[in-house]
Amino acid sequence: MNEGLFFLSFVLVLSIGLMLVSMVLGQRVRRNRDKLVAFECGFDPMSSSRTPFSFRFFVLALLFLIFDVEVVMIIAFCYSLKTVFLSLSSMTVLYFFLFFFILLLGLVHEANEGSLDW
C-alpha cells in the first residue's frame, strides 16, 4: 500500500512541477481572432456539414477494414499453429482455408466489378 501511495504522490508532484516549469519558461502568446478559430485542414468551419462524399472512398475503406480483420485473424491463426501444432485438427485447417477462400472470392468479385479501379 505504501508503494502505491508513494508512486501516486510522485506522479502528482512531477506533474505539477512540469506544469509550473512550463508556465515559467513558456512563451506568452498573443490571442487574436485567427488563433482562436479551429483549423480544419483548410476547410471553412462555418460551411454546411452536408458535403458530397465519394462512394468509392467508402467502398475502399470498407474493403480495407474487411481485409485488415482478415490479416489479424490469419496472424492469430498462424500464432496458434506455432504454439499448438500437434493438437491441430484437419477440420481447423479446412475452416481456415474456407474462410480465406471466401474472402479471396470477394476480392476477385470487387476487382471484376471495378470497385478497385480509380
Image (spheres, helix red, strand yellow):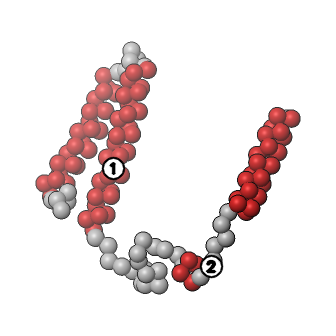
* Amino acid bearing label 2: Arg
- Secondary structure, mark 1, is helix
In the image, taking residue 67 as reference, residue 35 lies left or right, namely: right
Q: Is residue 34 left or right of residue 10?
A: left
Residue 93: x %, y % from top left: 30, 27
Residue named by callout 1: 66
Camera-side residue of 49 and 115: 49
Q: Nearer the viewer, residue 29 or 8?
A: 29
The answer to whether 60 is drawn above or below residue 35 in the figure is: above
Q: Dot 2: what SS?
A: loop
Q: In which quadrant of the rendered image does the C terminus lie?
A: bottom left
Q: Position of residue 92 (x, y in %)?
A: 34, 27
Q: Residue at x 43, y 84 (%)?
A: 47
The residue lying furthest to the left in this view is 112
Which residue: 67% across, 70% down? 28
Residue 35 percent coordinates (x, y): 56, 77
User: Within 10 angstroms of label 2, few (less than 14), some, or many (20 or more) residues?
Assistant: few
When the figure is inspected, residue 80 is found, relative to residue 58, above or below; the finding is: above
Picture layout, residue 114 above or below residue 29: above
Residue designated by label 2: 31
Taking the spot 27% from the left edge, 38% from the top edge, the residue there is: 100
Residue nearer the viewer, 106 or 33? 33
Where is residue 85, by image quadrant? top left
- Which is in the foreground here, disc 2 or disc 1? 2
* Residue at 27% in and 68% down: 55
> Could you tell which of marks 2 and 1 lies nearer the N-terminus?
2
- The residues bearing labels 2 and 1 have C-alpha atoms spaced at a distance of 46 Å
